[in-house]
Amino acid sequence: MARRLPQLVVRAFRLGWQIDRVSVAVLLGCQILSAVLGAAGLFATTGTIAAVFGPGKVGDKLTHAAPSIAVIAAAAALRSLLGIAIHAITVHLSPRISREASAAVLRATVATELTAYDRAGYADELEAADRGAEVAVDIIGEAQNLLSSVGSLVGAAGVLTVLHPLLLPLLVAAALPQGFASVYAARVQFLANRLASGDRRILLNLRWYIHQKNNADQVRSDTMGRFLLDKYDLIGRRLDGVTRRAALQGARVSVIGAAVSGLGTAVVWLVMLYLVSTGRMSLPHGGAAVIALGAVGSALRGIVGYGADLFRTGMYLDDWTSFLDKAGGFALQRGPAIAQRPERIELKDVSYSYPSSDRAALNGVSLHVETGEILALVGENGSGKTTVAKTIAGLYLPDSGAVLWDDQDTRDLDPHALWRQVAVVPQSYARWPLTARENITLGHAAPGGDEAALRAAAASGADEVIAKLRRGLGTLLAVEWMGGEELSGGQWQRIAIARAFYREGGLLVLDEPTAALDPRAEHKIFANLREVARDRAVVLVTHRLTNVAIADRIVVLEDGPVIQQGTFDQLVAQEGSRFRELWDLQNDRTGIPAQRDVTARQEQEQAQ
Ligand SMILES: Nc1ncnc2c1ncn2[C@@H]1O[C@H](COP(=O)(O)OP(=O)(O)OP(=O)(O)O)[C@@H](O)[C@H]1O
C-alpha cells in the first residue's frame, strides 16, 4: 500500500490533469494551503493551552493567548472556505474523469479486432475495464481526501514530536494493524467483485433480454417470464453468496485490526499519562498533546480509510489501464498501407479457426472476385460462408494463407481505410435508433443533400418505406422515442440494403440480404444487382439458389473447404454434386426437378 498509494495519487491527478489543468492546479494549491493552515492552527492551539495553563493572572494569560486564538480562528475560517472550494472542484472534476475513462474504453473497443468478441474472457476484461471507468469518478475525491489526511498528519505529527518524540512512533504503530486490515478487506472485496463479474454479466444480459422490445412478444407467447425471473433470482442469490462471504471475511479481519489498534491506542494514552504523572512532560504540554494526539489519530484513520478506498479503486483502474494498453490483447495492429478501390480480391489457401473453437471454420479456401463480378457463396448451415465473407471484407485476418486486395495482404493494410472500401449487409443488421436518413448515410452525408440517399433507397426498395414515414428521411426509426416510428422486418432490411448501396466502397458483401423481403422487393434487389456490381466486386451469400443464378461464379463450401466452383449452369449440370443435391431439394416442392427430369427424358428420347 505504501508503494502503491503515492503512484495512485499521482495517477489520479494525472487523469484530472488531462481533462482540466486549471481545476487540478487549484485543487492542489487549496490542499497545500489547507494543510499549512491546519498545522498553524494546531501550533496556535498548543500556544493557547500553554498560555492558559501557565502561571500568572487570568487577564494576563488571556492577553498572552489572544494572538494564538486569532490565528486559530483565522485558520479555521480559511480552512472551511478551502474545504468548500475543494469539494466544489472535486464534484465538478470527478464525473468528467469517469466519462473520459468510459470514452477511452469505448475508443479501445472499436479499435479491437472483431475476433476479440469470439474469445472467452474478452467480455470479462471489457466489463472489468468498464467498472474501472465507473469507479474513476471516486479517484480524485479519494486522492484529495488522502492528501488532506497526509497534510493534517504532517502538521499534527510536527506538533506532537515537539511535545514528546516518543508519542508519534507509538501512535503510528498503533494505527498500522487497522491499516493492514482495511487494505486486506478492500482487496477481498475487489477479488470477490472480479470473481462475480461473469454472474453480473449474466444478470445484465437477462435484464436486457427481459426489457428488450424485440423479445417482448416471445417472453409472453413462450411463457418465458417465470423461467427468466427464476434464473435471475438464482444467479442473484449466487452473487449475494459471493459478496456475503467477502463482506464477512473483510469484517473478521477488520475487527481483529481494530481491536489490535484499539489496544495500541490505549498504550499510547497510558504512556502519556505516565509521562505527565512522572513530570517528564509538563501539564500544559500534556494538554496540548491530548489535542495533537486527537488530530494525529484522526489523520491516521483518514489515511488508513481513504488509503484503502484509493487502493481498491486503484485495483479497478488497473483493469481499466491494462485493457486500454492492449485492448484485451486484440488491438488492431495491421500495416499502414492504404487500400484503394480493389480491382481483384483473392483468398489464397486461407484457413481460420474461431478462438473458442478447436475446429477450423475455413480450411484451405482459395477463391477470387473482381470488380464487375458477382461471386456467390453457397453451402449448408455452418459451412463457412459468413466467415469467408468476413475474411474477404478484412473483418477477420486468416490464421494461415492470405487475403490479397490487389496483391496487398489485408494484414498490411490500414483497417479503417480498407473498411471505407467495404459495404456489408450482414445477416443481422443494426437497427440504429436514428433517423431514416442517418440509417442510410451512417454519418457520411453526401455533399449534394439527400439525392444520393434517395437513389440508394430507390435501388433497394426503401423509397417506398420512406414515402410512408411521417417525416420522410427525417423520421426517427425508434418507436420508443417521441416522434419515432417502427418498421417491419422486411422494411428494415430494405433500409439496410440501401445503406450498403449508398456506400462508395469497391466491395459489396450481401449475407442473406433478402431473407425478410417479399418477392417483389427481392426481385427488385436482384434486378438492380448487376447494375450495382458494374463498378464493384459483389460477394453474395444466400441459401435461395434461384438467386445465385445471377452470379458470375458460385463457390460451394462444406465444413471449411471449397468443394465446388463454377457457373450456375455448370454446377446444376453436375449430377450427384452437393450443389445439384441442394438445388433439387430446394425445388422438391415446386416441381422443378420433375420438369427437369421430363425435359431430360424428352431429350433422351429425341436423341434415340
Ligand atoms: N463467433 C463464433 N465463434 C465460434 N465459432 C463460430 C463463430 N461463428 C461461427 N462459428 C463456427 O464457424 C463455422 C462456420 O460458421 P459460418 O457462420 O461461417 O457458417 P455459415 O455457412 O455462414 O452458416 P449459416 O448458413 O448458418 O449462416 C460453424 O461451424 C460455426 O459453428
Image: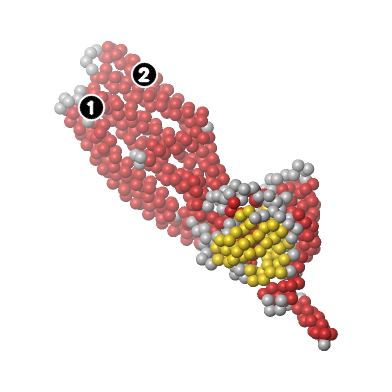
Q: Residue at x 74, y 72 (%)?
A: 570
Quadrant of residue 68 in the image? Answer: top left
SS label for mark 2: helix
Labels 1 & 2 near each other (Cβ < 8 A): no
Q: In this view, does 96 lie above or below 550?
A: above
Residue at the far bottom: name it.
Answer: 608
Residue designated by label 2: 71
Near-viewer residue (69 or 202)? 202
Which percent across, then down, holds residue 544? 72, 68
Q: In this view, does 493 lie to the left or right of 175?
A: right
Q: Earlier in the sequence, mark 1 or mark 2?
A: 2
Label 1, ligand 1: CB separation under 8 Å = no
In which of the image's four quarters is ligand 1 placed?
bottom right
Instruction: Give the label on residue 164, or none.
Output: 1
Can residue 381 be seen here? The reply is no
The quarter of the picture where the C terminus appears is bottom right
Which percent across, then down, holds residue 198? 48, 56
Q: In this view, does 393 lie to the left or right of 330?
A: right
Q: In this view, does 363 lie above or below 60?
A: below
Q: In this view, does 520 lie above or below 43?
A: below
Near-viewer residue (386 or 139)? 386
